[in-house]
Each structure stands twice: as structure tokens, then as C-alpha cells.
Image (cartoon, coloured by chain):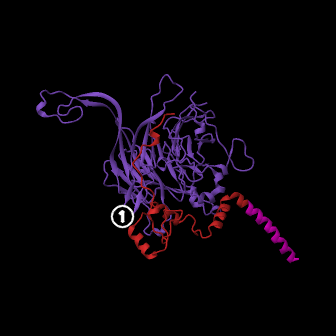
Amino acid sequence: MSQKQEEENPAEETGEEKQDTQEKEGMLPERAEEAKLKAKYPSLGQKPGGSDFLMKRLQKGQKYFDSGDYNMAKAKMKNKQLPSAGPDKNLVTGDHIPTPQDLPQRKSSLVTSKLAGGQVE
Amino acid sequence: MIPGIGAFTQDTLWCFSQVKGTMETGTTEADIISTVEFNHTGELLATGDKGGRVVIFQREQESKNQVHRRGEYNVYSTFQSHEPEFDYLKSLEIEEKINKIRWLPQQNAAYFLLSTNDKTVKLWKVSERDKRPEGYNLKDEEGRLRDPATITTLRVPVLRPMDLMVEATPRRVFANAHTYHINSISVNSDYETYMSADDLRINLWNFEITNQSFNIVDIKPANMEELTEVITAAEFHPHHCNTFVYSSSKGTIRLCDMRASALCDRHTKFFEEPEDPSNRSFFSEIISSISDVKFSHSGRYIMTRDYLTVKVWDLNMENRPIETYQVHDYLRSKLCSLYENDCIFDKFECVWNGSDSVIMTGSYNNFFRMFDRNTKRDVTLEASRENSKPRAILKPRKVCVGGKRRKDEISVDSLDFSKKILHTAWHPSENIIAVAATNNLYIFQDKVN
């Protein structure tokens, strides 16, 4: 008898749980999105929105080319290729040394804003 | 119907007035508008861009012949405010992008504004010259020195009219006071001081003194590993020169009183809405980060903008906002991709209308939203070249969340997230708004009957 009850109860509970989760996901699309993100990037930091973001934010400026580092790295690597910049050129990660190819073009002579030219509409 | 400043009754219709900027696709980064601000009378409208340039538009006098056209804004002055710099010590490039422009109230014939990039604030004087002295004794008309031996008579130089020339000159440069990136500047109601805020510190300046500033807020922890929040925006109270607020990346606002102590690390008031812990997700803190904070003109309320909402807070109630408006809640189910493409970090601004009855903020797809605080009605409008016929009435837009999409609606998946309206401005007393859509500036007015 009791066994039967135990069998029954889990089914009921699962039913309720299911409803609960569905409700929760319905109410919290954020959670579903979070699950998606964690699935894509399992190594994503435990601390949500923690100091990683803030550190990145504080170091918004670009790291520029340092010829000393570059030559040292070149000497170490000898014939090997230097690791090239990843999609996010702003981050200096690992052994990546900024190379001349990574630098943005310096701005040419300053031009008047297009808002100041053209017809008044 | 009660007419009034900023009245947003059923009958308020917004019309296209002007658009500035080019239509060409493939925008150069430098042309992206990064700040928009009316001056205190609404006569002038300033924009700053990523290229460090400021363009000021002036409203033309309304002519009696064209009663249906309210004064249009035409270019008044343009100048290069900031240039790219290089911090050699840290090997960092300092962007010339203008983060904020704030006008000073007009006290004489000249106009003054503050403009700032990440590191340096500058005070610019914009003045008109329409007369030129002629008839010098020692110089000829081209400015070359005359041989004194040839001068036999004396004459008095006279001022003669000339074509109007508008000059912008930098009067003060407030540099080297910020280690981190300046996000806000705010002119104090005493008109003698102003503040500049970066991620971790806020400094108080006197307009006359450029080599010193007072540090009034410092939230830098002794150990940077313990950093949990940064300052995102700051503003002085419109009337009380001792009071200011600053917002944080954790969705909180602190109100400080400079009379309490020299360093205002201890707040006078702390505004935070309690969060249901069961609702917490990875994104919670990121989307609660406040991107803009603005006092109402009355000084009784503050408005904050976070990623999905705009909130109005009563200064007398710290434990929750009195009003919350959903800007684009349908994005909640898109947070994963918005995180991946960095859009979740976009910093939208918000503005009050002149009578504090309507608030406005931007969204994606060149949409912007207005919320009437009295009627609780809201509208979504679009800044696009397609609705650019003079005095064309803007049609309200609607985003379809799911299911059947009506003909006029646009589905969430079709939204263009590269077309973001981050910066808008509202004329101080009239229903005229300026909306920055990437490299174009739209000016809309309410329909004149």
C-alpha cells in the first residue's frame, strides 16, 4: 500500500513541479536565457556580473604596441608566428603581444562634422 | 482639454521637423553622435560626437510669414573640442569622444558650455562678433605695420559692421584629475562650481580654478579585488547647491549633502528597490546597472534608467521607486544574445519634459519611447528617414512579442540592434525634442494647430 502511495506521490509531485518550472520559466525568461548562456560558455564565472565586468570597464583604454616586449617575444618565439589578436583586441591576454598589425590606423587630419555641413531640411 | 507646457493629452501628435547629418550608409565612427543637450532657454542645441567635435545649432527667429513653422535649428558654430591623446606612461589611448556637454546659464552676451571626454573637461566660450575696428594709425588695413615716418595725421579707429562671425574659444581646461573614465559632468546651481564623475571618484571644481579640484566621493576600495560597484552617473540638485546624487552599477542611487562632510562617502539617502531573491539570474546585476540619473526640473524627483526600465523616485522615499515604466521588456527573452553582442551594456539616457509630466528614453531599431506620468499612456516612435517629410506626423510603432504579427508591427527578431537611440534631449519649455540616431540628429515638434 505504502509503496503504491510512494509511487503515486512522486508522479503528482513531478506534475506539480513541472507546472511550477513552466510557470517559473514563463515568469522568468531570464533564467532560460541564463541557461542558454551557460550552455554556450560553461566556464563563465561563478560571480554574476562581478568584478570581471568592472575590471574590463575600468581598463577601457587600448594597450598599445611596446617595442621592447615585441622584440623580446620575437626572440623567444624565434621562427614561430606570434599569436595574433583575438576578436577582442582590447584585451591583452596570455602571451599576446600587440603587433603593428593590431594597431588601429591613426586618425588623419581633422574634418568638420557632417552635421555642420549639408542642407537644412 | 487643458493646454499647457508639455501637456501630453490624447491630442499630442509628434511631427518631423528636421534631420541633420548624411544619409550615406557606412558611417565613419567619428560621426557617431555621443551627446545632445539644449541650453537653458532652448535657443541653442549642442551635439558632441565620437570625433571630439561639437556642433551647436541655433533656433531661428519665428517669422510672421510662416506661422506654421516653428523656428528651425540651423548651424551656429562648430569646433573641435577634444583631440585624441596618448598617455605615454600607461600606453593608453585617450579617446576624443565627447561624453557629455552641459551648458552654463547665460550671464552675458556670450554662451558657455562644458564638454568632456574620458579625461579632460573644457569650458568653451561661444561668442559673436559682428563689428570690426577699422582705421588704426600704426597698422594698415591688412594688419601690416606702417612706417611711423609716413604717419602725419592721427585718426580715431571706428567700429564698422562685418558679417557675423561666431567664435568658440577654450577658456578653461580642467585636466589630470581623473584616473578613470569620466561619465558625467554637472553644473551646480550656484553657477560657480561643477562636478565631474568617473567610475570611482567625483571631483568638485570651481570654474575659475583649473589646477585644483576637491574630491568629494571616492569609492575605490583599498584592494581592487574587492571592487563590487562603480559610479555610473551623477548630477547636482537643480536648486540646492549642496545636494547631488550618483548612481551605481548595482542599481542604487545615493544622495549626498556636501555640508555634512568634505568627503561625501557616507550618503544622506540611499535609494534601492528590494529585489526578490528568487528572481535573481546571471543577468540581474547587469540589467539593473543604472545608465543615467536625472533630477526633475522641480527637484522633487529623480529618474533612473537601467537596461529595461525607467524609474521615477521620490526623494522622500528611499525604499522603492514611485513609478516604473517598461521600455522594452520583450528583450528579457533575448538577454543571452544581447550579452554576446555586448548590447546589454548599452548606456541609454533619459530625459524629463519641461513640466516633468512626460519622460522619454531611447531603445533599439531607432525607436524611442515617451511615458506620460499623469495619464499613464506611453508611445513608441521611430526616427527614420522614411518619416522625414516636413511636418509629417509620426505614427506610433509597436513591437509584436509573439504569435500573430499585425501588419504594422515589427517582431522582436527583426529589430535592428545596431540602430540604438542612446541620447535624446527635450526643449526646456516647449514640445521640441532632439533625438540622436547614430550619425543623424532628428528634431521633432508637436503639431502646431
State the image coordinates of residue A81 (x, y, percent, origin top left). Answer: 49, 71
Is B375 displayed left or right of B292 in the figure?
right
Q: Is residue A9 magenta?
A: yes
Q: Which residue lies at the image location 62% right of the left edge and 58% below the top edge?
A: B337
Q: Is residue A2 magenta?
A: yes
**Span shown in magenta:** A1-22
Q: Quadrant of residue B125?
A: top left
Q: Give the residue furthest to the right.
A: A1
The answer to whether residue B43 shows anywhere in this view is no
Q: Colour of chain B?
A: purple
Q: Say which quadrant the C terminus of chain B sits in.
A: top right
Q: Position of residue B100 (x, y in %)?
A: 44, 48
Identify residue for label 1: B89
Q: Residue furthest top?
A: B65
Give the residue displayed 70% in from the left and 57% down from the top: A27
- Residue at the image point whose x is 26% and y is 28% from the top: B159
Residue B11 at x, y percent in the picture = 62, 32
Q: Main secondary structure of the magenta part?
A: helix
Frontmost residue, A26 versus B167: B167
With respect to residue A84, does B121 lie above or below? above
Q: Which chain is red?
A: A
Q: Quadrant of the N terminus of chain B?
A: top right
Spot occupied by residue B174 in the image (x, y as percentages of width and height): 35, 52
